[in-house]
Image (spheres, grey):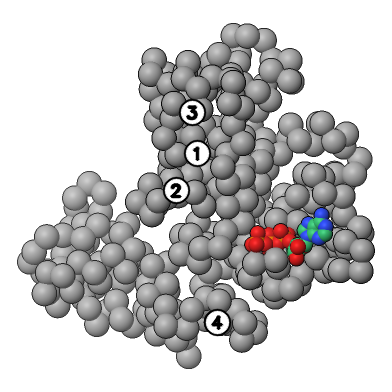
Amino acid sequence: MIEIQSLTKRFGDTVVVDDISLTVDEGTISVFVGTSGAGKSTLLRMINRLIEPTSGRVLIDGQDTMAIPEDDLRHRIGYVIQGYGLFPHRTVSENIATVPRLLGWDKKRIAARVEELLDLFQLDSGEFARKYPHELSGGQQQRVGVARALAAKPALLLMDEPFGALDPVIRHKAQDDLLAIQRRLGTTIMLVTHDMDEAFHLGDKIAVMDQARLLQYATPAELLTRPAEEFVEKLVGTAERPFRLLALGKVREAVEPGAATGKPVSASATLREALSQLLWMGREKLPVVDADGTPLGRISIGGILAHGRQPA
Ligand SMILES: Nc1ncnc2c1ncn2[C@@H]1O[C@H](COP(=O)(O)OP(=O)(O)OP(=O)(O)O)[C@@H](O)[C@H]1O
């Protein structure tokens, strides 16, 4: 668990991060959004002490980060930035092995970990292990950057605009891959983005910042249905609200008894995906199946729309 307590940063007379407190639960993703210059990157960099706080504390699993030597702290916290910061004269393997090597792991353990990560990130070892960063596509570099940050099994992964340089299609795939890997490894992640779709897609919780202050820190659904301030409502996108709510809900939550004909919808699909399928196919209802193809009932346009309304 990460506890941020009254964290403040001033540069001269300017307050860049103003008395921010929040807790990130273990194994969850917290996403930081807000206007440019709101202080998101500064907040993130105070966690691994790339920037020293003016006041306040950060506790990692109960331990004050000021009590941890800086090197140890950076080994315990993975850091991924836009542009990935890969070492250009080191191969993919050597890049991924950076922190385990600094930690003095033996060669066999490092090699096994590099293999494991290449596999996890779907980078064929024979093809990629000995390549240099400039020989990789942007998406591949991004994966190596995240693999490197995860190499020593960090207690926390900080990500500052990690997908900012990727085109929309690869970006979506990279987000899905990160989610799958995060769920599998149980990594705790704090991620900064400008992209609200990304925030809603990835965040267990979303922190909204404006002018150095934290306006709201809540689940995506709470942010939509109970925005703390007008700024939050605007940032979330008033016109997008019902669709974002539907994207958070799953088909299994809206299954109705009865049969329907047509191409079945998976119970694990989002309500937004199901609505899209119904509209596109010109159907009022479609059958729902679980992962094994077992019929569970049906889903209807009316049933889905009820989930996109403002709660009473
Ligand atoms: N070393 C510094 N000295 C003075 N001011 C700084 C310094 N670093 C950052 N700032 C200022 O602090 C404010 C917050 O910057 P920060 O990069 O944390 O914001 P951000 O929310 O991450 O912005 P963006 O979304 O544009 O990346 C900005 O106004 C920036 O100019």
93 or 37, nearer to the observer: 37
Q: Quadrant of residue 193?
A: bottom right
Q: Secondary structure at mark 4?
A: helix
Q: Secondary structure at mark 1?
A: helix
Circle 2/circle 3 CB separation < 8 Å: no
Q: Is mark 2 within 8 Å of ligand 1?
A: no
Front of the two marks 2 and 4: 2
- What amino acid does circle 3 point to? His
Distance CA(mark 4)–CA(mark 1): 31 Å
Q: Earlier in the sequence, mark 1 or mark 2?
A: 1
* Label 1: how many Cα within 10 Å (few below 14, some 14–19, many 20+): many
* Label 3: how many Cα within 10 Å (few below 14, some 14–19, many 20+): few
Q: Residue 142 got which mark?
A: 1
Residue displayed at 59% across by 31% down:
86
- Which residue is label 4 attached to? 234
Q: Earlier in the sequence, mark 2 or mark 3?
A: 3
Res 178 visible: yes
Q: Quadrant of residue 135?
A: top left
- What amino acid does circle 4 point to? Lys
Q: Residue furthest left?
A: 261
Distance CA(mark 2)–CA(mark 3): 16 Å
- Which residue is label 3 attached to? 134
In the image, residue 144 sits, relative to residue 201, either above or below, namely above
Q: Secondary structure at mark 2?
A: loop
87 or 94, nearer to the observer: 87
Circle 1/circle 2 CB separation < 8 Å: yes
